[in-house]
Image (cartoon, helix red, strand yellow):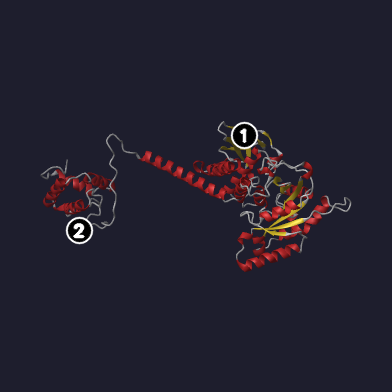
Amino acid sequence: AIFTSSRPRALTPVRLVSLMSSSRGASAAARALLSRASAPALRSLEEASSAFPRLGTVAANLAERAAVSPWRRAWFPWTRSYRPGGAPASATRRVGVPRILPEGEKPESRGHRAERLRRARIRHEVKMAREKAREEVESEAWVKERARLENLAKSSRLTHRAVALDPDATVAERDQRCVRVGVVGVPNAGKSQLVNTLVGSQICAVSAKTNTTRVETLGAVTRGDAQAVLLDLPGVVGPEHYRNPTHATKVSSAWAAAAGCDLLLFIVDANRQARRPDPRVVDLLASARANLERLKYTEVTGLSMPPAVLALNKVDLFRGAEDREALKRVARALASVHPFEDIFPISAAKGKGTDALLSHLLLRAPRRPWDLPPSAVTDKSAVDQAIEVVRESVYRRLHQELPYSIVPVHDSWTNFDDGSYRIEQTLMVDSVPMKQIVVGTRGSVIGQIGIRARTVLEKMFSRRVHLVLNVKVRKKNNSLRGKARTTEYELY
């Protein structure tokens, strides 16, 4: 109505002055109005500028920009920085024209826009968390090992095939061979990672935190007529490193379980031992014979000590000739402390050197029936495996002493007709502030824990998994859901 008049009126400069002295919103409104202005309207504005000098070079500027760009999305001088005698100070800034709503559409309020952006941000964070979890799981050595074995089972060139992957292959009980291997080492040596890699499944929780393994975990791998039963034990340290009576009980049970094995597999972090030697490693190897003789292998029983094998883990971190010489020095130093049958440099995280180690273990298997069926990789149930996966996700996401006091408890397991699973678990915490930390802002922390655990479970079970995680505070009467605390809870 202002610019369509052929003759300028007194109302025209009043409106323009008002726009010039208002805030950024008024400037945006002026651009939106001028975006629909026609050439006659600009000529009318030029006549108005000659009648009212305060407009300065507005009309000339608008006419020039209108000739260059028909949409006139460039800068228009209706701002507070406009100088009547020349170009404005912020002439280089270019601001887009606000979106013109179609007929019938209402403008979006600030609340609706904030909510829309919040939901978009949440969707983006969830997408990025899923992609990160998928990349981490795909890079796991046990996932690559499972894919390799599946490809071998499908190919016709397979000569040394696993019975677990060949349903038609059978081995008579008299021809079966089985060896029990105890995996021993100090905390954070990579014992659970190695067991997962050899077995080809996620049966043990793995994290960078110390004492992640709480109880003995049994894994089995079958190749041909031989089966290796791997016993993943908690980290073994000396009495001077015990943190509490529960820690001492764990170490004692680990030695007792190792005493019943046919072969001992000592794992050492070679990278740490070469750069900053851990005195606990030497103490472990020096006291191994004494601890085992005290439990079983004594002169009275007449039993001989089980043979031992040394695995130098994390050799993928060594680079160059100097690092290889350091690795050899570590091997010679440890071999002088305890007698080993053989020494294997491996990388449990990358899966390097594990085939040679597994072949050596299977060759040492005596004639004995298998402990587990050939298709089984562990004696744990599917529920226990799901709990272990959730506990690993908790250890990876939370820090300091917080994950050690969180106990995942199974609630329900439902099998759907489409083959998917619905698993519901509850994370028991000790206090309300701890619950707030576990849940996070708008459920961000518990959401990241669930995303990673769901990705691992889907890879393990090869089907879709619906994982539901709840967070509850433990009862004040030192009980779990009102009942007496179980032995498994005390181990945490």
Crowdedness near tag 2: few (<14), some (14–19) or many (≥20) residues, C-alpha within 10 Å:
few
Q: For the residues marked 1 and 2, what is the alpha-carbon distance in whole angstroms? A: 75 Å
**Contact, mark 1 vs mark 2 (Cβ under 8 Å):** no
Relative to 7, is 357 above or below? below
Quadrant location of the C terminus in the rendered image: top right
Which residue is depicted at the point 74% across and 55% down?
238
Q: Secondary structure at mark 2?
A: loop
Q: Position of residue 354 (x, y in %)?
A: 66, 54
Count of numbered marks: 2
Which quarter of the picture shows residue 466? top right
Q: Position of residue 227 (x, y in %)?
A: 73, 47
Q: Residue flagged by tag 1: what amino acid is it? A: Asp
Crowdedness near tag 1: few (<14), some (14–19) or many (≥20) residues, C-alpha within 10 Å:
few
Residue located beneath label 2 in the image: 86
Q: Residue 350, labelled with which disc?
A: none
The front one of 10 and 461 is: 461
Query: Does residue 289 show up?
Result: yes
Q: In the displayed image of the protein, which residue is found farthest to the right? A: 300
The front one of 456 and 392 is: 456
Quadrant location of the N terminus in the rendered image: top left
Left or right relative to 173: residue 301: right
Q: Residue flagged by tag 2: what amino acid is it? A: Gly
Left or right relative to 161: residue 447: left
Left or right relative to 264: residue 400: left
Query: Does residue 377 show up?
Result: no
Q: In the displayed image of the protein, which residue is found farthest to the top? A: 417
Which residue is depicted at the point 71% across and 53% down?
359
Relative to 321, is 165 above or below? above
Residue located beneath label 1 in the image: 411
Q: Position of residue 181 (x, y in %)?
A: 74, 50
Q: Nearer the viewer, mark 1 or mark 2?
A: 1
